[in-house]
Image (spheres, rainbow, N blue to C red):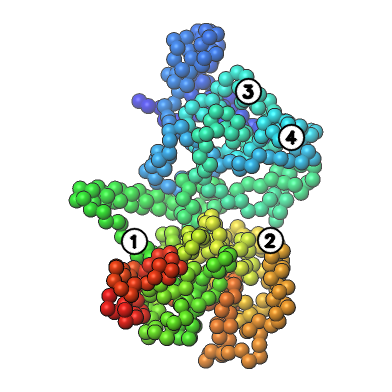
Amino acid sequence: GEEYIRIVPRKKSVRVNWGGFTMVKATLVALNTAFGLDHYNDLRKQTKNVTKLAEEEGTDAKGRPLHDNPHAFKFHKLIHLASTTYPLASNTEIRNTIASHPLDANFLHIILRPQNPTPSVWNYFVECDDAVHRIYRLPILNYERGNGVDIYTSSQWFIISRDFAWYLADPPKESFVDYYLEYIEHVVVADESFFGTVLRNTHFCATLHNDNFLHLQFDRWENEAAGQRDERKCIMKNPDHCGRSPTTMTLDYLPTLELSGDLFARKFDDAVEPLIKDYIDKRREKEEEILKREKEFMKDMEAENKTESLPLEEWEFQGEGVLIVAKETVGDKEPLCLGMEKDNNKVLLRPCFRKEVPPTLSPNWETGAVIIEETISYNRWDIGPCSSDGDLKRNETGELEMIPGEYSVTGPKCMLKIGDGARAGRCLDVDSERNQPGGLMHIYPCVTKWHQLFSFGNGTIAPRGAIHASLPLHIVRQLENKKKNVTAQLCLGVKGRGDADESSWDEDKGKNEEEEKEDNQDAEVGPHPWEQPDADLYPNGRKSLQLWSGQQIQTTPCSNSGAVIEWYYVPFIIEDYGDEEGMISDADASSSEKSSGNSATMSETDEEL
């Protein structure tokens, strides 16, 4: 039968040191084993049955390619994984994803800007006594400096074609690899400078797909370790110039892994988190079932010549987006919503509707739906994708009901994407991954990290209707080790309205020049509206949220009563005007990229239609 498992022969196994060339060497030895060269090369040495010409052409004495020798594995793609790596996707999804690309595609994550280090940190290293030792400086390779070729930083974990795998396993003499190996052997962390550099500097360059479908999360550098540091990772002249390793995945990170879109992740440690792989396996089984149902559904639709789509989740609001309304303002003359400024990425509290609309709103309008033409642009949001543990449902009052999951007490975590304008599809984001209260909210390209994944409060961890982000466990531990205050749940809110003392949040820390300029301008203008002694109050004694209209939303502790904003979620549905008279003008329609709404307000013209 077919051979599916092969182990590198003991005599050829490689003892690997952190940061050493032995990581590259071990990978190349494994490639040799995959192609059966362990056996075949020994046989060639013993029988000398390969002619010189055949050797040069990479064939055996009978003219057969060496990579197709009888001892080589049969494969189209080679996936290089660590022992601490685990699949996130089902086998069907892994196969479908890889097969959707050309057969010769090579999946590596490469930083496409060449390395250009300073001479003082580019050193010559050797490995001995199970350690990596710095000897002296190494000449820098950089094309613009006139020194040979460019070196690229890349991951050592990859999915590559059979042809590229063979090129690495048995490189032609006097090829790029043949020369480069002599140099890279003495570069620290050579595994991150070898494979991407080879691909970029050979005829395989055009086959790059710059994604290895592997999810990694780094947290701290080794010199930041709370306890005793691993000195093997601190080998530079400066003892505090250290390396780092990926974060060990814990249960709280499962939603991020699910939404990452990656096929694999690392690193996993059964001693640290014994249950996480079991939950991943359950989701992989569920995904396999969903893919089978989708295939059967599409087959049935094709047989019946129909074009129906699969049903949407309830939180997808029929695919038309949602207006996120501040609860306290629904009865105000001008209800306020979560929205974005037209000319920048700031997320603000801003009017929901055009000025003429609020007087026409029917009672309890927030429990129904709205026409998008009646709303102000850049107020439309798309919720999702969301993680699958737990549930979200919109109730009759317009709130999102969060139901906790099997392992997630905060229920599903979701991306919130802006639905209008040139930035449509970008995600709500806590600026600069700020893990302390006071982080300003803006729109940023989606990256599937904790600061772009939000949960919805149900009155336990966060107030009912609140939107909040959760700090990952590894960040919580870092803050605790540094003796800093930890606020694990950060809710969306406003500055200066809550009960908490905000002066301890160090808001000025790390501000850029533009933010400093804005602060100076604010200081020149004088007190904010909410700081005035005669500021408007709601019946509950809190200052009116209207005082924060136009102000940027920020994170605040979910326990900070008054500052945390609670929200309603009001969907849009399509309003078809056809060619009738009285239809909205092109100018009005263009101000909102998509027409939708189940009207809570209707003009006379609308009623006629």
Give the mark nearer the N terminus: 1 vs 4: 4
Question: Residue 178, which numbered label?
Answer: 3
Callout 2: SS: helix
Q: CA distance from mark 2 to mark 1?
A: 44 Å
Position above or below: 66 against 464:
above
Tell whether label 2 touches label 4 (CB within 8 Å). no
What type is the residue that disc 4 sits on? Arg
Q: Earlier in the sequence, mark 4 or mark 2?
A: 4
Within 10 angstroms of label 1, few (less than 14), some, or many (20 or more) residues?
few
Please, what is the three-letter code of the amino acid marked with disc 3? Asp
| Residue position marked by numbered label 2 in the rendering | 481
Question: Crowdedness of circle 4 by 10 Å Cα count: few (<14), some, many (20+)?
Answer: few
Hey, what amino acid is under mark 1? Leu
- Is 60 drawn above or below residue 223 in the view shown? above
**Label 2 amino acid?**
Asn
The alpha-carbon separation of the residues under discs 3 and 4 comes to 22 Å
Q: What residue do we see at 58% from left, 83% from top?
A: 547
Q: Position of residue 375 (x, y in %)?
A: 44, 74
Q: Residues within 10 Å of mark 3 (few under 14, many from 20)?
A: some
Closer to viewer: mark 4 or mark 2: 4
Tell us which disc is closer to us: 3 or 2: 3
Residue 159: percent from left, percent from top: 49, 37
Q: Nearer the viewer, residue 512 or 164?
A: 512
Q: Residue furthest left?
A: 304
Q: Which residue is mark 4?
A: 145
Q: Secondary structure at mark 4?
A: helix
Q: Residue 460: where, in percent of width, then height? A: 49, 74
Q: Which mark is residue 312?
A: 1
**In the rendered image, is residue 195 in sight?**
no
Closer to the N terminus: mark 3 or mark 2? 3
Report the Cα–Cα distance between label 1 and label 3. 54 Å
